[in-house]
Amino acid sequence: MAASVCRVGGAVGRAFSRTRGPALLSLRRGRASVTYAQSLLGAPETQLTALDNGLRIASEDTGHATCTVGLWIGVGSRYESEKNNGAGFFLEHLAFKGTKKHPQSALEQAVESMGAHLSAYTSREHTAYYMKTLAKDLPKAVELLSEVVQSSALSEAEIEQQRGVILKELDEVEGSLQDVCLDLLHATAYQGTPLAQSVLGPSQNARTLTRQDLVDYINSHYKAPRMVLTAAGGVNHDELVGLAKQHFSGLSFEYQDDAVPVLSPCRFTGSEIRMRDDAMPLAHIAIAVEGAGAADPDIVPLMVANSIIGSYDITFGGGKHLSSRLAHLAAEINLCHSYQAFHSTYSDTGLMGIYFVTDKHKIEDMMHWAQNAWMNLCTTVTESDVARAKNALKASLVGQLNGTTLICDDIGRHILNYGRRIPLAEWDARIEAVTPKILRDVCSKYIYDKCPAVAAVGPVEQLPDYNRMRSAMYWLRF
């Protein structure tokens, strides 16, 4: 059943066939070409409807024979307390272990009989349950999703069984040093606030969370106004709205004692955390400043800035001919095994940073050139840098929407973050509007002379002192 019912901890992957038959190639050569602008304007419209209880329904009809339908909920580890941190992740494990109407075996059989794929994931601000299936099976898929979200069995026996599974997963995650490093970065950057908490929660909570804790979590957060029923593929919006009325109209929109959960502000603290282990072969290091929130207009120039810095892996071809200056240096003087610029966005804040993996003797050099790349963004970025980055960013945005599942996820997160789906044409216009001056001004606002947060794991003796890293966040210019 692993092929049809599973949970997803990260981004949904895709595997594409590399083989192309001669007949297919000749057909493609004869096909009329479509410009990038035409493809943007020809993208299907996202339709949005709201029910009386506040549940929103959003869909995009792409004409595919398959579809992805799911519920995106505005809740994650940021809404948890120290006592119940990890409750959302625990529920993710229990989601497909049976409902009040369908025991686990019947639920799995129902999914398997449709040839469908049922998945879920939890992040710091969002939770999603979704199913990929044939378009003709949309009604059954919505019915099963409504049961999973509204009528999960949460049996005591299954809860006890999943404790052991979760504890094993927590041990396994310790082996993913990128996840460990980025969790530590959140822990130090947002110390003393809910965003410091990991999605998985501490092992102590996995041992002590009770059924009542999980029920209270559902009753507090699984409310209609915080949910979006999303579908993409061969779907009819009116049909989806009818199914939503049938299965979700009874979903509660009232809070007990009118205690509506409100997000507490998450302050950013420039600080560092080091986990030194000289027995490890490579150092894993992340440095970040506070970035823009998801709905902040500054998000687009910062995305372009990250595109300028780019990413690098030792397996990349190109070497010193890579377009990013930092990637060029990384290849030419062997600065690191890999690096990537990232921007983790939340509703009111974000982390803009660089994560890299390097040899213990190259830490100081890599940190110097990474911070130097940031200073270049604030002071000397050129027209050609911005033009290249804008093209790369546009290609990335279009490439991320390859398949109904990725489109569905994009719609769900957009509705929760912005209250609407931002079309590709609008993203394109906002990216095109970024000039070198705008980029320098925005980067100066968020990066120049700001206190960074740093997390380091492994043989990190050579990592510079925090005050030295802080002093590299500005240049003495005359």
Image: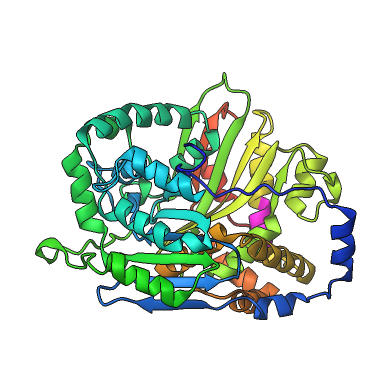
Q: Residue at x 43, y 26 (%)?
A: 171
Residue 452 sits above or below residue 45 on the image: above
x and y percentages locating residue 146 in the rendered image: 32, 58
Judge whether residue 477 can be spotted in this image.
Answer: no
Q: In this view of the protein, which residue sits in the foreground, 359 or 93?
A: 93
With 216 as the anchor, is 56 left or right in this view? right
Q: In this view of the protein, which residue sits in the foreground, 44 or 216?
A: 44
With 371 as the anchor, is 57 left or right in this view? left
Q: What is the image's colouring?
A: rainbow
Chief secondary structure of the magenta span?
Answer: helix
Judge whether residue 160 can be spotted in this image.
Answer: yes
Q: In this view of the protein, which residue sits in the foreground, 375 or 259?
A: 259
The span picked out in magenta is 372-377
Q: In this view of the protein, which residue sits in the foreground, 286 or 170?
A: 170
Residue 385 sits above or below residue 367 on the image: below
With 1 as the anchor, is 61 left or right in this view? right
x and y percentages locating residue 94 in the rendered image: 32, 41
x and y percentages locating residue 351 in the rendered image: 49, 55
Tell me if residue 379 is in the magenta stretch.
Answer: no
x and y percentages locating residue 206 in the rendered image: 29, 33
Q: Residue at x 24, y 52 (%)?
A: 218
Tell me if residue 375 is in the magenta stretch.
Answer: yes
Residue 339 sits above or below residue 294 on the image: above
Q: Residue at x 64, y 28 (%)?
A: 360
